[in-house]
Image (cartoon, rainbow, N blue to C red):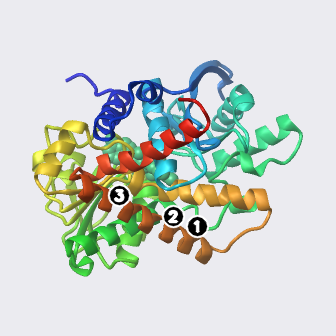
Amino acid sequence: MAKLNLFEVAQEQLDQCAKIIGLDPDTHAILRVPLRELSVSLPIRMDDGSIKVFKGFRIQYNDARGPTKGGIRYHPDETIDTVRALASWMTWKCALLDLPLGGAKGGVICNPKEMSQAELERLSRAYIRAIYQFVGPDKDIPAPDVYTNPQIMAWMMDEYSKITGKNQFGVITGKPLSVGGSAGRGDATGLGGVVTIREAAKEYGIDLKKATVAVQGYGNAGYYAAKLAKSLLGCKVVAVSDSEGGIFSKEGLDGDAVSEHKAKTGSVINFPNTKAISNEDLLELKVDILIPAALENVITEKNASKINAKIVAELANGPTTPEADDILYKNGVHVIPDFLCNAGGVVASYFEMVQNFYMYFWDEKAIHERLDKKMTFAYHSVLNTSKKYNINMRQAAYVIAVERVVEAMKLRGWV
Ligand code: NAD
């Protein structure tokens, strides 16, 4: 089967929305493609003395509502179309959460697992040198995504500060605390997702204290979602996985112990007293809540009818294809769509930006309360819109977000 093109998926989702809201063809044409794309080649001196040329991208999809914002992904399978799709979803995400920001995304085709820390530092600094004229605290503000982390954000912020000749903490978010990072950023994506699950469970009468959870992808988003689903909601996490495979325990997993095991061995697999499970089988487990928190296109028309969960909380970007969406909707599975479910990260990133501008920092409690309020409000706006128009949650999220972006474009005289 040909690999699904993520950008075509994103465009099809937008096309569905355009039909629902009767979007005029000119505005639709503008919104179907990114406003700006930058492709760069990054020659890096490797530890063995050779030079390797990496390909990088930064795509600013739409900035009608403000400076663009979006993470940087390091991945061997990264493509420009994946970055385009992710940049479009950042645009809709920021609009849905009513943040004064547009959407962007960046990526470098590389395999960080095969690179030393020194090579990663040289690559991260080279990436910023290549794109620095296009980013900035009032232009475009990157953040972490798959296989990038606070240390990488610190190197990037430092490189940008050196080039511009002043400390510019606000150029990037997801930084470590001691260099302008925000309290509550680490677990923000997981927390935001858990807030939407809490609200969905109220709506669907699910007793969370008796609910079971499976999480695909045990990285930043998935680890915290599993941890907080247990500690805040009282759920039992029965399965988790990573790129190597998954583990299952009917009695429930100790998230921190699994995390320590992954830190030691490089994977969650072979955790004591658990059953091995494949990533495919994990998705089809009979659980109350399924959290895809790894990569895109994992729920497709092939396996959608085998999804047994009541709620699918999409912490990953783009885990469900449009065909699968239809099947899940028909089968009564409540999908909390990606750019709603995983918006906690960008909300906390926005708080980090605000604190960097102010040079004054809030405590974790303030961040969590503000994040909870924004996520709860956004969840119910999407739910009410889906009921009002009799459309699925993803289409409802698109309706709200696209209408906000279009309003800004009209007010600015773009259309
Ligand atoms: P991460 O790099 O911290 O973790 C990714 C995890 O997925 C790792 O455990 C990895 O082993 C696992 N993985 C990779 N390939 C896999 C596969 N084929 N099957 C199963 N697991 C696999 O990344 P992250 O930041 O947690 O991001 C995960 C997803 O969440 C991505 O789609 C990302 O775009 C989305 N997201 C993350 C944030 C954030 O703040 N971290 C915010 C919004 C959305």
Where residue 368 sits: x, y (%)?
Answer: 54, 72
**Amino acid at the residue labelled 3:** Val
Which of the 4 image quarters holds residue 354?
bottom right
Question: Against 293, is 86 above or below?
Answer: above
Mark linked to residue 101: none
Q: CA distance from mark 1 to mark 3?
A: 25 Å
Which residue is drawn at the image coordinates 46% and 52% (left, top)? 96
Report the number of numbered marks. Answer: 3
Who is closer to the viewer here, 6 or 93?
A: 93
Tag 2 near tag 1, CB within 8 Å: yes
Q: Is residue 4 above or below residue 139?
A: above
Q: Is residue 87 above or below residue 199?
A: above
Q: Residue at x 26, y 77 (%)?
A: 208
Q: Residue furthest right?
A: 165
Q: Helix, strand, or loop for circle 1? A: loop
- According to the picture, the residue beneath numbered tag 2 turns out to be 187
Report which residue position mark 1 lands on. Answer: 184
Confirm or deny contact between disc 1 and disc 3 (CB under 8 A). no
Residue type at mark 1? Gly
Estimate how packed mark 3 is, as few (under 14), some (14 to 19) or many (20 or more) residues with alpha carbons within 10 Å.
many
Disc 2 residue crowd, few under 14, some 14–19, many 20+, Cα 10 Å: many
Q: Tell me which amino acid carries mark 2.
A: Asp
Q: Residue 59's x, y, as percent? A: 56, 30
Tags 2 and 3 touching, CB below 8 Å: no
Mark in the foreground, 2 or 3: 3
Q: Is mark 3 within 8 Å of ligand 1?
A: no
In which quadrant of the rendered view does residue 77 lie?
A: top left
SS of the residue under disc 2: loop
Is 304 on the left-hand or right-hand side of 215?
A: left
SS category of the residue bearing label 3: helix
